[in-house]
Image (cartoon, grey):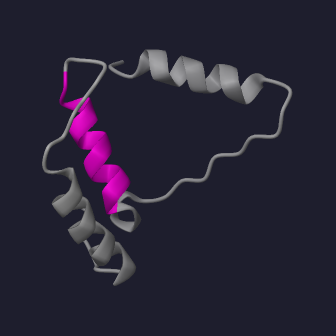
C-alpha cells in the first residue's frame, strides 16, 4: 500500500500508553486539509512547497465556513 509506512506509524502511536483518539471527517467538511493532502501525496519529495497556498486556502476556508456542499463522487 502506498501509505503503509504512515499507517504503521499511526498504529504505533495509538498503541502507546497515552490517551489518543481519531475522528473521521469527510473530505467535503475539511476541504483545506483535503487539498493539502492531495498536493502532498502528488509529490515525490518529503518537503513540499506550494506557492499558491495562501489564495487557494483562503478560498477553501471561506467555502468551509459557508458549509458549501460538495457532491461525493
Q: Quadrant of the C terminus?
A: bottom left
Q: Quadrant of residue 15?
A: top right
Q: Position of residue 2 (x, y in %)?
A: 32, 20
On the picture, is 61 further left or further right than 71? right
- Horizontal side of residue 64 vs 21, given as left or right: left
Q: Is residue 45 magenta?
A: no
Residue lying furthest right in this view? Answer: 17
Find the residue positioned furthest to the bottom: 66
Examine the rendered structure and indicate whether residue 29 appears above or below residue 21: below
Q: Nearer the viewer, residue 11 or 43?
A: 43
Instruction: Name the residue located 44 percent from the left edge and 17 percent from the top edge.
Output: 4
Q: Choose top left, top right, bottom left or bottom right for residue 37.
A: top left
Q: How far across and down, in percent of the image, does residue 53 sit?
A: 21, 51
* Residue located farthest toward the left when viewing the structure as drawn: 52
In the image, residue 28 above or below residue 49 = below
- Vertical order, 37 against 60 (above or below): above
**Residue at the spot 39% in from the left edge and 62% down from the top edge:** 30
Stretch of the chain drawn in magenta? 31-43
Q: Is residue 8 visible?
A: yes
Quadrant of the image for the N terminus?
Answer: top left
Q: Residue at x 46, y 15 (%)?
A: 5
Question: Is residue 35 within the magenta segment?
Answer: yes
Q: Is residue 73 visible?
A: no
Helix, strand or loop for the magenta stretch, by majority? helix
> Horizontally, is 2 left or right of 45 in the view?
right
Q: Residue at x 67, y 19 (%)?
A: 12
Q: Position of residue 39 (x, y in %)?
A: 21, 39
Between 65 and 6, the one nearer to me in the picture: 65
- Residue 54: image quadrant is bottom left
41 with respect to 7 (left or right): left
> How many callouts does the rendering have?
0
Amino acid at each position: 500500500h502506498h501509505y503503509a509506512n504512515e499507517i504503521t506509524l499511526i498504529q504505533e502511536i495509538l498503541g502507546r500508553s497515552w490517551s489518543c483518539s481519531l475522528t473521521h471527517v469527510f473530505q467535503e467538511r475539511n476541504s483545506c486539509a483535503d487539498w493539502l493532502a492531495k498536493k502532498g501525496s502528488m509529490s515525490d519529495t518529503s518537503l513540499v512547497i506550494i506557492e499558491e497556498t495562501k489564495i487557494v486556502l483562503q478560498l477553501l476556508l471561506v467555502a468551509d465556513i459557508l458549509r458549501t456542499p460538495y457532491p461525493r463522487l
